[in-house]
Image (spheres, grey):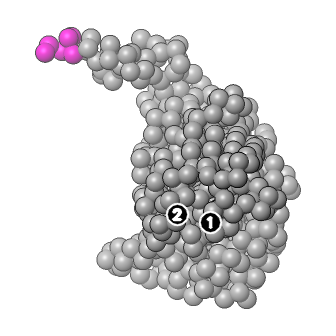
Amino acid sequence: MQRRDFLKTATGAAATLGLSGSKDCAMASTGVDHPCKEASFPKVEKLTARVAEFVVKTQLSDIPNETIELGKKSILDGLGLALSGSKAETAGLVQKYMKSLGCGSGGASVLGFGVKMPARFAALANGISIHVDDYDDTQLASAKDRVYGLLVHPTVCVLPAALATAEVGNMSGKDLLVAYQVGVEVECKIAEAISPRHYEDGFHSTGTCGVFGGTSACARLKGLDVVHTARAFAIAASQAAGLRENFGTMMKPFQAGHATESGVVAADFAALGWTGAEQILEAERGFFHAYGGTYDPAVITERLGKPWTLQDPGVSIKPFPSGSLTHPGMTELLRLIRTNSIRAADVAQVEVGTNHNMLNTLIHHRPTKGLQAKFSMEFCMAILLLDGKADQTKFTDEVANRPDVQEMMSRVRFYNDSEAEKAGYDKMTTILKISLRDGRVISGHADFGKGSPANPMSYDDVAEKLLGCAAFAEWPTSKANQVIDMVRKLEDVSDVRMLTALCSK
């Protein structure tokens, strides 16, 4: 086939398959300029520099008190999850790998262990532990075309990188707070700005967009100026990675850990003088174009810190260690079980209707592994009906393969509901219909789950969750309670090492 024939065929195939960088323009990977590029991709100069200025110039006094307190809840949540995640199989594998590299001493703390490693590797290990149970906080969308709950897990990408950098730098709790806040804000706005196609086509936003959060936090802690912070973004962008096909495997938490590790690496290399494109976000061969085709620049130019994402639309803290899209249905099912005294033996069928994006994410319909069960609406419904709870002990291979669980999952119908679809993707509308063997039908509806801004957890609620994580990790209650008290007044902590010591053996 001659080259001109190949280009013609490829272009036609791309249009037929709907491979597009925007709604109005089909894109073909032909190696030639795309005819719609000028019209479809925004031209905004110095966007990366604006983000870098935000990172460099923001002070604690610029951050609303409500936002600071919301951040403390998520930091506390992350620390508890690092402890519980230290019991996962992945933690042992990471330790084994690090020992093979000779990285077993010095640097920053690996939470839940008596081990210190170079900051980048401590961030990797802690990031994997925080995300391994899929129990960490979730960014929410503010626009109807941005899928609610499908942007990034903000804390896991920022806290491990910031904590490791602050620990080796002997920095204060106030330093950590500011770095955490700017990191979360930057990654969340980048995730909200990029075209929804980014996630829908298979990218894992926590891995791809989250890398800018850890980078922002570390650049701030290392005192980089605007130019070097922009270069750090360029270094980070070339490490941005993550694919949704890996959901339900060890690679999902690895992608989160890699994002936060890359933040440490990016800031370290930029501080050394390593160069990179200083317009990496907005360039036509940069992040937004390559990873999403297009983006909404106003999310950054007009709304970066105005308002802070932690405050509006908010971040959801998880009540269950499963994909956040299961939580409205799980919250509602628990309510229905309790108010109607529903027993598993009495259930003929459970119908769960959602929008298609939720179906596109909760892809494991008959899971046989604990990690798959976290992304299975059928499993989450079944385990609540059978056991009345869904904590870390339930999302295991053994439980997923229990005959009663497998049989109950066959009674759950998970489908795309037209009413849920019409509600918009800025909600997680879940419609339940429980048909009982005696002929009764019990119905329920939920747009949000426990832990969302619409039904938030208090600091004390998150503290209770941390105590549960500590118990799961067989961690001393006395230390756990000290962590709770210290994070509550984090701005008064003179040395972050006081906090990491409480989370280390």
Part of the protein shown in magenta: 1-6
Badge 1 or badge 2: first in the primary sequence: 1
- Magenta-colored stretch includes residue 166: no
Q: How many marks?
A: 2
Q: Quadrant of residue 18?
A: top left
> Foreground residue, 299 or 432?
432
When the figure is inspected, residue 329 is found, relative to residue 492, above or below; the finding is: above
The label number, if any, that marks residue 405 in the structure image: 2
The residue positioned 47% from the left and 51% from the top of the image is 364
- The Cα–Cα distance between marks 1 and 2, rounded to whole angstroms, is 8 Å
The residue positioned 63% from the left and 39% from the top of the image is 354
In the rendered image, the quadrant that contains the N terminus is top left
Q: x, y (%) of residue 59?
A: 77, 54
The kind of residue on which mark 1 rests is Leu
Q: Secondary structure at mark 2?
A: helix
Residue on which disc 1 sits = 386
When the figure is inspected, residue 261 is found, relative to residue 193, above or below; the finding is: below
Locate residue 94 relative to residue 468 in the image: left or right.
left
Q: Residues within 10 Å of mark 2 (few under 14, many from 20)?
A: many
> Foreground residue, 504 or 391?
391
The residue positioned 52% from the left and 86% from the top of the image is 114
The kind of residue on which mark 2 rests is Val
